[in-house]
Amino acid sequence: MITRYKFQKLNVYQMALDYVDSIYSITDRLPDKERYNLISQAQRAATSIVLNIAEGSTGQSDPEQRRFLGLALRSYLETIACLDIMERQDYFPSEILEEIRNQGHQIFIKLIAFRKKLT
């Protein structure tokens, strides 16, 4: 990937891209009955993390960038709720979901730190 924009150099952006890959990988294994519900929701929420990091980091004021990082955090929490539903529905063993939760938690920590830095 050729890096053209400053957000592409952000570690949290690259981590979020990896998280999207993980979410897509696991949702691709969900039953077809979840196609228009859980699959779509989890994928859109994960994608939204990346999109909000990108949108907030280019040419925005600090308060505006903080707002977009807040939206990214909310989207991340949506993915956690989706993972909780997957676990309750016994779609995957909790160990598999825990790996993805841990991956996402690292993004959560970075997003919080990034927001604090902008204060």
Image (cartoon, helix red, strand yellow):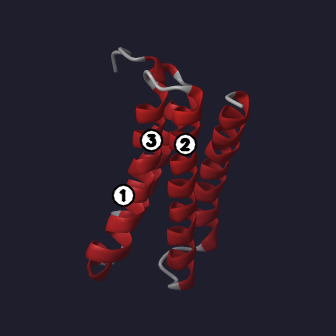
Q: Relative to residue 42, is residue 117 depicted above or below?
A: above
The numbered mark, 1 or 3, whose residue comes first in the sequence reads 1
| Identity, as a three-letter code, of the amino acid under mark 1 | Arg
Instruction: Kindly identify which numbered label has been placed on residue 36.
Output: none
Q: Which residue shows up at 39% across the image and 17% down it?
A: 5
Tell how many labels: 3
Residue 59 visible, this angle: yes
Question: Image check: 60 left or right of 100?
Answer: left
Between the C-alphas of marks 2 and 3, the distance is: 9 Å
| Identity, as a three-letter code, of the amino acid under mark 3 | Asn
Question: Mark 2 = which residue?
Answer: 67
In this rendering, which labeled residue sits more in front, label 2 or label 3? 2
Question: Mark 3 = which residue?
Answer: 52
Check disc 1: other Cα within 10 Å, few if <14, some if 14-19, many if 20+: some
Check disc 2: other Cα within 10 Å, few if <14, some if 14-19, many if 20+: some
* Foreground residue among 72 and 107: 72
